[in-house]
Image (spheres, rainbow, N blue to C red):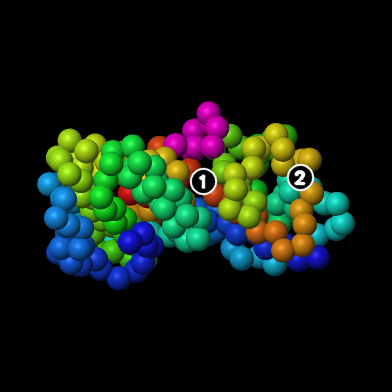
Amino acid sequence: MIRVQTEDVDIGGLIAAAKDPGTGAVVVFDGVVRDDGITEMELEAYQDVAVAEMEKIARSATEQFRLRHVDIIHRIGRLSVGESILVIVVSAGHRPEAYAGSRYIIEEIKKSVPIWKKELTKDSGRWVPGEHGHGKGKQP
Amino acid sequence: MTVKVRFFARFRELLGTDILTEPEKEESLLSLVRDIARKNKEGYDAIFDEHGTFREFVIVMRNGKRVEHDDATAIRVADGDEIAIFPPVAGG
């Protein structure tokens, strides 16, 4: 399942659905809102393109790491400290592929999926700068 | 002819989004976005440099596909196009 959604994620359900008789390992990545002195985090997506890009990443990871199952659920909207932002569940026959596939997916998401985060504080807010721009220029 | 221009994140806060516009025939992508961005100086300055070209970090898409900045003058917008302008992505 590849989705962008506001609702919370049933990680237990995803883990159960990721297993089949050939599964030897399931790796879960749960990216969480950290308390960096913020009240909430607000997330925004270019939704159609974000889903298409995550589907492309999932296909690529499946081929490269022989994954048996991939779920990527990215949340948008306002999230509180401790809530899940991004959940990636992958399964594979063996742990090296499952770990490597999970790591590949999160790093690729950070490079190319059009989603943005704003950290909200009591008085204002601040957009989290992206790590990967279009060209060489840095975001001010 | 109708073209939709979408700004995201900080650019959306400054310029709005889902802007439906009726460009001139043969209008370039660069010229169209410049015209819309001119309504807010801070928004314009966030996207364009002093020469009126896209700042290097700005990402431009046409119908979900990335557009190289150097091509933005040559590309003529067409009816039904969706142009998206946004800062570097920061998901995950």
Q: Name the disc covering residue B75, or none.
A: 2
Report the front residue among A118 and B67: B67
Q: Callout 2 environment at 10 Å: few (<14), some (14 to 19), or many (20+)?
A: some
The residue that disc 1 covers is B87
Q: Residue at coordinates 20% horizontally, 42% vertically from top-left?
A: A98
Q: How many marks?
A: 2
Q: Residue at coordinates 60% horizontally, 48% vertically from top-left?
A: B65
Q: Give the range drawn in magenta.
A: A132-139
Under mark 1, the amino acid is Pro
Answer with mark 1 or mark 2, whichever residue precedes in sequence: 2
Q: Does mark 2 fall on the same chain as mark 1?
A: yes
Q: Name the disc covering residue A115, or none.
A: none
Query: How far across and how far down the image is residue A14, in percent?
Result: 21, 62
Q: Residue at coordinates 70% horizontally, 59% vertically from top-left?
A: B81
**Whether residue A82 is visible:** no
Would you identify the image quadrant in which residue B51 lies? top right
**Whether residue A64 is visible:** yes
